[in-house]
Amino acid sequence: MKIQNIVKLSLICFTFGNLSAQNPWPKATETAKPWTRWWWMGNAVDEKGLDKQLTTLNKAGFGGVEIVPIYGAKGFENQYINYLSPEWMKMLHFTTNKAKSLNMGVDMSVGTGWPIGGPQVDEQDAATKMIVQTYTIDSGENFSEKIVLKDEKQKNLKTIKLNIVTAYNEKNEAFILTDKVNSEGVLNWKPATGKWTIYAVFVGKTLQKVKRAAPGGEGYTLDHFSPDATKDYLKTFDKAFGNSNYGIRSFFNDSYEVYNADWTPDFLSEFKKRRGYDLSPYIKYLVSDEQSEIAGRVKSDYRETLSELILNNFTKDFTDWAHSKNSKNTNQAHGSPGNLLDLYAAVDIPESETFGSSVFEIPGLRRDSTDIQKSDMPDFNMLKFASSAANVTGKKLTSNETFTWLTEHFKTSWSQAKPEVEQVFLSGINHVFYHGTTYTPADVPFPGWLFYASVNFVPENSLWPHLEGLNSYIERTQSVLQSGKSDNELLIYWPIYDTWSSPKGKDVAFKVHNVEKWLQPTTFYKDLKELSKIGYSLDMISDKMISESKSENQKIQVSKEASSYQVLIIPELTYLPETTLKNILDLAQNGASIIFQNEPKDIPGNFEVEKRRNQLKSLWNQILFQNQAGNVKIANVGKGKIVLSSDVAKGLELLKIEREKLTDTGLKFVRRNFDGGKYYYIVNYTSKEINQNIPLNFIGKQVTLMNPKNGDFGLAQTQNNSVRVQLKSGESLIIKVSENADNSISKWNYIEKTDTPIILNQPWNLSFKEGGPELPKSQTLKKLEPWTNFSEDPATQSFSGTGVYTTTLNLNKKNTDDYLLKFDKLYESAKIIVNGQEAGIVWSIPFEINIGKYLKKGKNNIQIEVCNLMANRIRYMDQNKIIWRNYNEINFVNVDYKAFDASKWKVQISGLDGQIQIIPVTYSK
């Protein structure tokens, strides 16, 4: 029997492999370590508690925290601190000083809860919406009804005003009546002929307030389209911070979840300035459900204007403000109606979000349908919007809110977290934030304060003792993914005008939660999936980015700090601005290679349509295509080439752009370029083991394999531009391809053969070292079993913590290179101690670890410390009506957003089950 790619965990969590050789791992920093969102519930924090939790987080391998104040726990109101008050700023200053002493970083949100808003947002600056009322009037009729707002919720607002009044007859002829309505709402107009419908548009308010707000943070949400609103909002922070940033690395803005905000007081003037015509005569087409070409054109212009307003009046101002504090800023653009690529690119650290649980083919990976979000699943290509913006514009970091609602509360193991975060890495993201950690005062009993929608990365979690396994894995991986630059060869244009030009609806929100509406049905999405599957690496690009691009040496580059690309792909589309086509042709003239999937059919928008349509056609006709085999056309344009092909892969083949054929095995990868070589981060999500040579487009003079799970490294076996890898399902590997050879590095340990396994079927002792509500009784087991099998001891059914299985092994001889300890079933993670020495933590699939260097001939003591889920203890508490969730606001909900109750849960299996094998291993020489 053969065992492929053995996992070996180092004794110390953050060791980066064999230090006797030149270490190929990049130097680790606090940014390479995972960070966590840190909820301050009610801002009820104090210096003692902050000191304790930061120290605990540091020891567990966290590199930083992101402070987000939220609602508080009931009964602790006298400990609440108002957001940005002098006392709050004192706690912040203590936090950043303590973090600095621990070599940790601190970010903070510019607001409490979400979305951005608070008490400084007055009625004028609050999120704004258009309110439409319609009336009818016949010729010769005196219109007696007053045109005043009927919405009772809005009537008492001082900022409400009538913005547009336009009448349409049966021929759709428009007559603007705005200046014919007096301050009392009386219309001074009588149509001479026909029947007319009057559309009256009022500037109203959404009245939405900040969700999950902390004390001192309650209030209206912000009007993101108003520059005055943004400036007014940030003045409160200027007052609190003065000329200091209080040690904040980056100011964070959470996802845009502002509902029904589709207008701003000066929208009409902004629209005319930006789109070139007055919207008033066309307001009917914006607010109705008419399915016509003109409706789509008007709506496209409206949506583009909203996009420009949020970019220029909020996002850029937010960035400028953060820089004025000598800090960076982080922004989640998703959920907004803006062009996500441009919004992400306008900040220092673009941040995406994973929500829900993905499906993987990894055998043994638990995914219970009753414990996951039914409607949401992370989408790989949605994640790439943030990383693309960073890669194309040369930003070093792309962050991600990770593990939001990964599973039901208290049922997430670290083994479930690993493939989910790997998918984030494969998308090009390199700076993860856990969702998350809650501050808890020292005197609050188990389970402490908790926030819903999170994996509970808190010291009270019974899995906490083994979190260093996941954290060190992420640290090593991110140390590589933060090195150099991304190395993607293709750019693909996001044809946003095809979405904006839909006559359906009004504003379009590009949410994580509705990709099935705006992203997944598109050819653009299909291209992303298919090209990635066959081994191409892509980033997305916007119209604005294309306009800023240059072509040199047959490569396309948006900024000097960014990566360069070999080809720009224009996917199948209907609408393309003539200005964008002109910019694309300019790139080709200077040497760029372009692939069009089809001829653009039209220009978007409603301004000078025929003139611009003719310009588009004229520009396209400048491309003199020649037919090629396989229904492909090609044209030489200046120094570059333009290919027309419905099959993008054929076009790439014609341009001699090589794909990475390693994906033919089912492996997934992301590639980085560093000075002197390249990194490949490779993950095996298939259900099979892969033990073969895989081809690489880049080999260099030396190839080093690096195991991010334990830090091991060694020189790879290479042959004809291929590298031998051994990867079991669920494993990952980093391949470092170098132009310079390092003779100090030893060979990688490839498994040549395995001998007959030693089955540990002897008696075991089971005891318990920490956890609760009480420790079960110690037992002697005839065979390995989960401790939850012993229901005669009630404590085994309610216990969450650490159970210790111990036995002895008599090894008659030790005459092989290594020994692999392999679990059949593990619930959920284990620390392995052999002869008193820690061999490492087994926390992810495959559940196995090398222990050869700790074994000796003769008697060996084997100790396995198993941590289980929190679920059984929470079940016990709910069955016994022990109050542990008692919060203001939303309190605590389950994965379906219903009141949480674990009392009817089944007991979660805990401990060891099945066989444990110790497999003798021989490495190739």
Image (cartoon, rainbow, N blue to C red):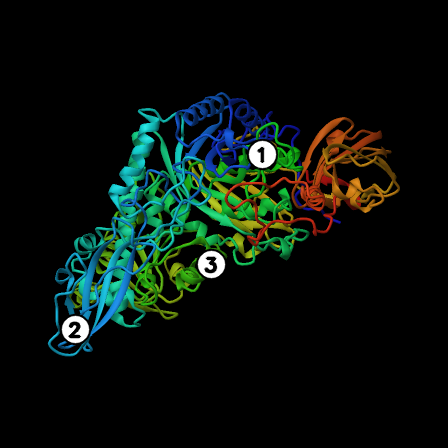
Type of amino acid at the residue the image marks with label 3: Lys
Please identify, in this view, whether the residue under mark 1 or under mark 2 is nearer the observer.
2
Q: Percent position (x, y) of residue 753?
A: 73, 44
> 391 and 454: which one is in front?
454
Please identify, in this view, whether the residue under mark 3 or under mark 1 is nearer the observer.
1
Q: Residues within 10 Å of mark 2 (few under 14, many from 20)?
A: few
Q: Toward which corner of the image does residue 372 lie, by quadrant?
A: bottom right
Type of amino acid at the residue the image marks with label 1: Ser
**Along the polypeptide, which appears first: circle 3 or circle 1?**
1
Q: Residues within 10 Å of mark 1 (few under 14, many from 20)?
A: many
**Along the polypeptide, which appears first: circle 1 or circle 2?**
2
Residue 820 relative to residue 529: left or right? right
Q: Toward which corner of the image does residue 246 lie, by quadrant?
A: top left
Q: Looking at the image, is 150 positioned above or below residue 744?
A: below
**Along the polypeptide, which appears first: circle 3 or circle 2?**
2
Residue 845 relative to residue 144: left or right? right
Q: Percent position (x, y) of residue 824?
A: 75, 47
Q: Residues within 10 Å of mark 3 (few under 14, many from 20)?
A: some
- Residue tagged by mark 3? 529
The answer to whether mark 3 and mark 2 are in CB contact below 8 A is: no
Q: Secondary structure at mark 3?
A: helix
Q: Looking at the image, is 127 positioned above or below residue 44?
A: below
- Residue tagged by mark 2? 173
Type of amino acid at the residue the image marks with label 2: Glu
Task: Say whether residue 645 is visible.
Answer: yes
Q: Percent position (x, y) of residue 679?
A: 49, 40
CA separation in Å, label 3 and label 2? 46 Å
Q: Secondary structure at mark 1?
A: helix
- Residue tagged by mark 1? 472
